[in-house]
Image (cartoon, rainbow, N blue to C red):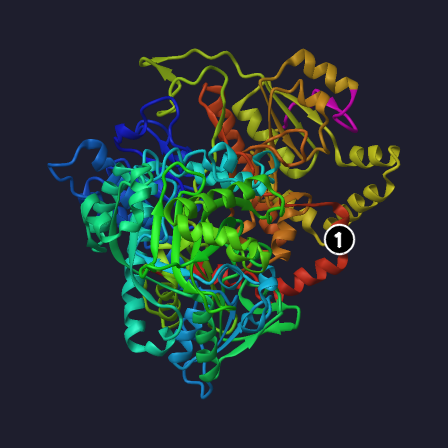
Amino acid sequence: MKFLVTTSLPSFHVGSKPPTYIHFSHVSSDLSIPLTSPQSVDVWICNGDEVTGYHMDRWLSQASHIPKSMLVQDATNIPRLQEFAKGRVAEIAAFPKREPAISASEWEESILRDAEMLYARARANAASQQASVNGTKGHARKTSVVLVGAGIMNLMTAQLLVDRGYHVRVVDQGPDPRSTQPGDWTCLGVTSGGHNARMFTNTEADNYNEQHSELYQDMQSIFRKSVRDGGWSVKNPKEFSAAEHAWVEAFERVPPWMAATFKKNIHEVNREAGKLWRELINSAPHLFEDVGFHDDIIRLYVESVALDKSVELHKNLGALLKDPSPQEFLTAHPRFRPAAESDHLAGGLIVDGFTVNVHLFVAKLINHITALGGEFVWDCKVEGIQRSPSGEVTALKSQKGNLEADHYVVSPGTTGSALLHGTASENLVQGVLGIWLQIPNLEPQLRNSMKIHRRGHKVEDINVTVAKDQQTGEDILIFGGGYGYVGLDRPAHDSPDLNALYDELEEVARIYFPQAYAAAKKRGPTAMYPGGHRKYCVRPFTPTGLGLFEKIPTAGGGQLIITGGNNTGGFAQAPAIARAVLRSFLGEHDPIHVLFHPDRGKLPPAVTYRSRTPSPSPILGSSSLNGKSQQQTPLKLLLLCSDGPNHRYLRYRLDQAFPGYRCIVEPNAGQIRHLVSKGRTLDAYWQRYHGLRRQLLGHSRQRSAHFDKLIRAGHVSPPPDLVVDTVNCAAVWDAVERWQPEITIVSGTKFIGKKLIARAGLMINLHTGHLPEYKGNHCIFFALYDGQVDKVASTLHQLTSTLDGGDVLDRVFPVVEAGDNEETLYTKCLEMSIDRVVEHVARFAKGERLEFVPQRAQGRTFRHSDRTPGKELWLWWRLNVGGLLSKAGSGKEEAESE
């Protein structure tokens, strides 16, 4: 998510570290630069007067497949902006009204909240437009739905769908939980693999990104510290993978105002889910019989400040049933007096909520769904999503063959990272485990389930559920709690941080139920851990705390919906998610479609800056200081390029903008000679093959004609300073050492070694391909081959010793038309990247800062040999028979006719 702010928001650019998700630009500066930056501007926060039709067109042409919105201070400008937009902007809205009682910073936060919601709505509405509504209407048969994952969320969804007449098939990689033994818990998911207890409260799902919270302290770095060091990580932070580091960084990037917004959104979903739970309890009471249903929840707090904050929160949520004084509470619950006397209890309250023994409840749901015609497929892993050339879902690939249906609902928990590859939800869900133990419920028995909050302890939140032991029938209390980040792994059985959580949970049982704990301890480990198994369940967390709700269209006119990632609230929010799925199938709106869109909270990583002089201002990006222009010496510029027609055009542009620049040419024929001299004859053969292919198909002639038209008639570039078979040679190193360039443009050379990189100043490579996904050669070809038309692009990035791995300066996206092919799109990308790099170098020459964003994903690297005649024939078929680009052309015509 990226905002461009061209109006005054002082509170958000104080200090030395401006937010990565906001680009502040003064109206007197060149707005076309931030409007076409590599991080596409999603929401333009403006006064309105400064926006011209030219600015609007430049902005909307960059990554045109991404929906964009505007938030306007002067609402009288909105009609003019709508005329400029011509229907291409998702939404243009006015600033929120400023109430007299709120401060300037509070009002500015409300502006950012509105902008973030514009962004979320645009993303969700774009997905809804792509996903057709129930393409099976009018068919005699029932609409079919395949649900992947038999956790509580999908079971509640299946129950609602089957009650509404859908034919459902639930597929799970584990065994039928109704027939498993206690020792089989590791084969099951979170719902059935954990202990036999689940709770609903209005705060059961929550947001943990808060800063300066009265309930959760020092959360900013919580996942970078182990449990034993006061953090939430069971996995050693030094052993985090790149994906796990990225997840933790995403958690840490969420700013306080956004965390507060997400917390409010989560609680809204919780409240709505609570209403749906009550409706189900009343309409289907048989599902809640003999499943250990207990109403109303007791909440205990160790600290008075947390108790007071919780009272306020539950009042606001309408969930507070009783707020007794500490003495009144102890009179009603004398068993907790020893805890209070030892400073382990400040007080308690009674809130709306309930608990069930979830294994019994799940068995009831499965039986109910089966009785209404639903099917279950156990021990079947779903391995991937199969798509058509245009990206629509055609089937799910499983160990037992393809799964086909009108609609799909995928909720794979923490084990489905591979299944979500290529979706917006990819890499968002990682694991944070919770642990379990049980003790006997001795007389006088506890009648209400409980929740204990112990701020700053190893186990901060503990649910205590009234239940019966499934094997013995004994009345027990099930303790569940703890936050232990494991990322994409599972903990070792002897993990010292996992053991520290179990020790802490036992300490909680000892403090609040000393007699029952002593009785369990006396019986031995099987009393607290049935069968001797120390159970844990790995909850699916997202960095934002928000759940997921992603829609992808299917080839048959239906939808594939991805849900999950609801942290500790999968059970609590399940009926609300189920209703959101049903409404999506029916073409109806549900707030969850927007609130849980997977792009919410995706903020840019930290930016690195490059400039000729110390940057004068992180806000305005201006080349002047105190109103006085800074004198700049002529830019020392070097060009490293090959000898293709696009390189002639690049030299022409630099001749006009930076006369006197240095140039070294590495011609195509020289590259082939160098490969042969190094014994790389196969690589030389493939490079020569592709040159001949372009000549035979007329592509070389077409490319020359295209760039010749762009060069002024009669123009002849000065001869290059050096012509070499490889730029990695002593002649080049010595020359560059003498020239000492400040900036070097690279286009079309072979891989550049460290010796030249060390001498060439800031190096910017023109890579024809969308980084980080497509690296190496023929990246436009392979983007089309994959059906990823939105990845047809060129990337300007800092050249480093890692092939196509440097930080990204910019990306350019050509207009894709129905008559295009790989060659025309490649040529468009070449032209656009050349024009763009000249713009950036001009800015650099004036002393302005260039912003570079790190690449995060790994991507794939392609060689000349990867592009075979067979693959070329397949792409030809997709373009000319499969109509891969036909939608791009029709979409453009429709937009122009509106």
Residues shaded magenta: 716-729
Closest to the observer: 574 or 770? Answer: 574
Q: Name the foreground residue: 260 vs 204.
A: 204
Among the 4 quarters of the image, the one containing residue 597: bottom left
Question: Which residue is depicted at the point 41% across and 38% down?
Answer: 457
Q: Which residue is mark 1?
A: 696
Q: Which residue is drawn at the image coordinates 53% and 49% (left, top)?
A: 427
In the rendered view, does 776 fall on the left or right side of 680?
A: left
Residue 404 location (% of width, % of height): 56, 74
Give the vertical position of 281 relative to 686 (above or below).
below
Query: Where 897 falls versus 141 (above or below)?
Result: above
The secondary structure that most of the magenta stretch takes on is loop
Q: Is residue 50 visible?
A: yes
Residue 247 or residue 360, whichever sits in front: 360
> Which of 9/383 is in front?
383
Q: Amino acid at mark 1?
A: Leu
Helix, strand or loop at mark 1:
helix
Q: Is residue 368 left or right of residue 121?
A: right
Looking at the rendered image, the quarter that the N terminus falls into is: top left
Q: Position of residue 50 (x, y in %)?
A: 27, 35
Q: Position of residue 359 (x, y in %)?
A: 47, 67
Asked whether 727 falls inside the magenta stretch, the response is yes
Q: Give coordinates of residue 171: x percent, y percent.
A: 56, 71
Query: Do we see residue 881 in this rendering?
Result: no
Does 650 lie within the magenta span? no
